[in-house]
Amino acid sequence: MQYLPILMIWKDWFSGIREIEESFGTGVKVPSKDEIEMRRSFRKSIVAIADIKKGATIMPEMLSVKRPGTGISPQYFDFVAGRKAERDLSKDDLITMDDF
């Protein structure tokens, strides 16, 4: 019977250790839902800065980079330049993969 209080203390102590271990998490950093939504609004996309007719070669001077980031990333700027437009593009249209 005299060991019962000591066992209760040990049980609480180990329970506290397990809670602390859980608070450390998995060690894998994952963006929250809000961060993912904010990323879209802060990211930039390639847009047409001039009207581009269907069949025309898309030249670098016809393109720019603007927000929001719902189109093609600026890292593909050189990939987009030099392609033929598959549809008419108006000024400030976001460029998508379907456009060339």
Image (tube, rainbow, N blue to C red):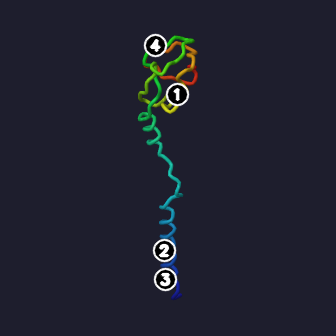
Residue at image mark 2? 12
| Amino acid beneath label 1 | Asp
Of callouts 2 and 4, the N-terminal one? 2
C-alpha span from label 3 to label 1: 72 Å
In the rendered structure, find residue 78 and report the number of the disc placed on it: 1
Of callouts 2 and 1, the N-terminal one? 2
**Nearer the viewer's eye, disc 2 or disc 1?**
1
C-alpha span from label 2 to label 4: 71 Å
| Amino acid beneath label 3 | Pro
At horizontal 48% and vertical 74% (from top left) the residue drawn is 12
Residue at image mark 4? 51
Residue at image mark 3? 5
**Considering the numbered disc 2 on the image, is that residue within a helix, a strand or a loop?**
helix
**Nearer the viewer's eye, disc 4 or disc 1?**
1
Q: Residues within 10 Å of mark 1 (few under 14, many from 20)?
A: few
**Nearer the viewer's eye, disc 3 or disc 1?**
1
